[in-house]
Amino acid sequence: MSELALILFGALLVNNFVLAQFLGLCPFMGITRSYDTALATGLATTTVLALSSAAAYLLYHGLLVPLQLEYLRILLFIVVIAGVVQLLQYYIRATSAVLHQLLGIYLPLITSNCAVLGVALLAVNQQLNLLQTLVFSIGAAGGFTLVMVLFGAIREVIDHPQVPAAFRGTPLALVTAGLMSLAFMGFQGLAG
């Protein structure tokens, strides 16, 4: 059980995919203009990450390994991720028109989020079992959502008219992202 807790904590904070491994930077910088959008995108990405990692694990070990086609894993994982995103989009459209409107074009863009593919590939490369893969993907997704929500909330505050013109927008967002990355690096000391 402690091994699963270490996997979860490591993916959530210590090796955060956005701030430590620099995966998923496009939605991090592009979607986090508001807290609500960041939260919705983070939760949708969490769902996609957990489902696609489990499906990728099962297909990799159930299909590719027995047929000795491991070299096709990236192609298979991309197809699995696209399928999960499409199913999630249909589900959200049918159950919550408000959430579907809020996510808009960003939901299909989860398909191209490198963090989603990165989690599936890292889980296979680290030779995690199915339970460990689920815990790893939930930790990574939780870390992604945490960072998205924190950054979205901070950006709502820093997009203020009293900020000097030279720092408004992207420059201050990049400085803030750098400071957040430094803060998350402090968690690395807890792992050792």
Image (tube, grey):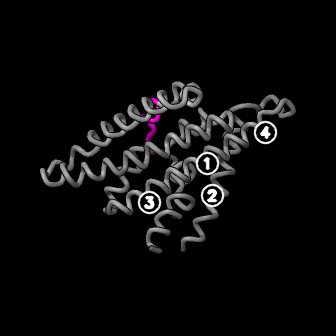
Contact flag, marks 3 and 2 (Cβ < 8 Å): no
- 3D distance between C-alphas at marks 3 and 1: 18 Å
Q: Depth-wise, is mark 3 or mark 2 nearer the camera?
A: 3
* Residue nearest the observer in this picture, 184 or 130: 130
Residue 143 or residue 91, whichever sits in front: 91
Q: Which residue is mark 1?
A: 147
For disc 4, the neighbor class at 10 Å (few under 14, some 14 to 19, many from 20) is few
Spatial CA distance of label 4 from label 3 is 33 Å
Mark in the foreground, 3 or 1? 3
| Chain-order first, disc 2 or disc 4 | 4
Q: Earlier in the sequence, mark 3 or mark 2?
A: 3
Which numbered disc, 1 or 4, marks the residue that appears first in the sequence?
Answer: 1
Residue at 57 percent of width and 59 percent of height: 13
Mark in the foreground, 4 or 3 = 3
- Residue furthest to the front in view is 95
Q: Residues within 10 Å of mark 1 (few under 14, many from 20)?
A: many
Amino acid type, label 2: Phe
Disc 2: which residue: 184
- Residue located beneath label 3 in the image: 135
Q: Which mark is residue 157?
A: 4
Could you tell me residue 15's position as x and y percent? 52, 58
Residue 111: say if magenta. yes
- Specify the amino acid type for callout 4: Val
Mark 1 vs 2: CB contact within 8 A: yes
Gap between marks 1 and 4, in whole Å? 15 Å
Magenta region = 108-115
- The local secondary structure at tag 2 comes to helix
Residue 52 colored in magenta in the image: no
First in residue order: circle 1 vs circle 2: 1
Disc 3 marks which amino acid? Val
The residue located at (34%, 62%) in the rendering is 128
Amino acid type of the residue that numbered disc 1 sits on in the rendered structure: Val
